[in-house]
Amino acid sequence: MQPGTSPTVTVSPFLRTAAAYAWRLLVVGVLVYSLFAVLGRFHEIGVALFLGLVITALLRPLADVVARGLPRPFAVVLTLLGSIALVLGVLALVGEAVAGERTTLVREFRVGVGRIEDWLERPPFRLNPGALSDLQAKIGEYLSSHRSTLVSTALSGAHHVVAVLTTLALAVFSAVFFVHSGDRQWAWFHKQLPGSIRERVAVGGRAAWRTFTGYTHGIVLVAAVNAVLVGIALWLLGVPLAVPLALLEFVAAFVPLIGSPIALAVAAVVALASQGPLVAAIVIGLIVVIGQIEGHVLHPLVLSWAVRLHPLVVAISVVAGSIAAGIVGAVVAVPLVSVVWSVHTALRDARAARAEAGTAPTDGDAETAAEAAAGGDAETAAEGGAETAED
């Protein structure tokens, strides 16, 4: 080393590579955190748009069929009004079932609670006969002494009801425009993007929508089958509230892995109070049976083509979503992860296809690559390539 010169510092290639990845990961982490912070601040809008997309995925095919004989606006209005009438009819049926069985339910539950008390007082539990009576008395005293607090809490929670109704209204309002002209909205958004990323967005967008619609159709079908099976089983066992419990199973099935067991656990409690331990044990056995049917029959047949995720990834996604955003996060987690993975796979396949072809992508190739990456057939890809060559 010459006098007056500074020593040369040598950095290993591994450290340079690690530092390059580290600052990129930090940037991505900051962006993801900022995105979730914004979504958390305006979560009602995010939930409304998600519900709007779910409604669009369910009703868009039906609206397209109706639009063959009617103008598009009338077809959209007719489809939405018919769907709302169907939902209100189901809710009215459930309310009528509960009201019709109210007197019988009160009597059966009183007898069932007494039966449970006698059962807990016998071996192996040997519970003190006065323990449950003391517990009921303490609960009554607590409710009486804290009546004003409970009433004020209930009244303060009224704004949550308003928020839910506002979210539902925004979801339906968004779905009207998505069903009517969602393709034109996407085309307008696509044209606003820089040309350098337009192709990748087209590929990713088509793959994301295909996966989301496939997951939505599949999960609704799985939930409907679960609800029918549970409703028939509860009706055959003589468990009261079979229709409301089947509706609870339908709603709970939208949370994979844990939704159905929770709904059936509620059904088991109703069966225990109304029919006794034997019927409750059979209902608990239904948890295993429904889980096996859902995991080994319905999901492979209905959802395997739309959701290609390992069960461990699904479980982690549901738990992480519930921690981050409660029940809404648990419902949204799996379709969100499925869409992200589908977009990644579509972009990777598109890059691999271009590398094998050895040609640069053009705007005309965007739709063809999107169809191929999103699962389109070979004929569509060949026709798109031919049209591009002719141009």
Image (spheres, rainbow, N blue to C red):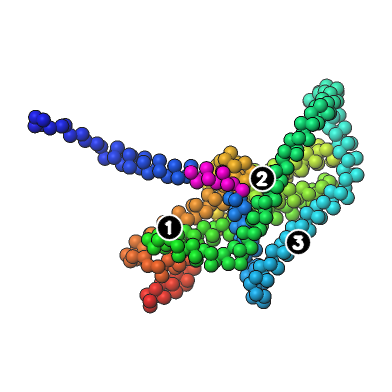
Which quadrant: the C terminus? Answer: bottom left
Residue assigned mark 1:
347
Which residue: 42% across, 66% down? 366
Q: Is residue 226 magenta?
A: no
Q: Residue at x 38, y 78 (%)?
A: 390
Of 91 and 52, which appears nearest the observer? Answer: 52
For the residues labelled 1 and 2, the Cα–Cα distance comes to 33 Å
**SS class, disc 1:** helix
**Residue 131 location (% of width, % of height):** 82, 23
Binning the other alpha carbons within 10 Å of mark 3 as few (below 14), some (14 to 19) or many (20 upward) gives few
On the image, which quarter does residue 266 sit in?
A: top right
Span highlighted in magenta in the image: 34-44
What is the three-letter code of the residue carrying label 1?
A: Leu
Q: 101 or 201, which lies in front?
A: 201
Judge from the rendering whether residue 313 lies leftward or rightward of residue 58; answer left or right: left
Q: Residue at x 56, y 43 (%)?
A: 40
Q: Residue lying farthest left?
A: 2
Q: Left or right of 276: which side holds 185?
A: left
Q: Earlier in the sequence, mark 1 or mark 3?
A: 3
Q: Which residue is mark 3?
A: 85
Quadrant the N terminus occupies: top left
Residue 200 x/y as whole percent: 42, 60
Foreground label between 2 and 3: 3
Separation of marks 2 and 3 at Cα, in angstroms: 26 Å
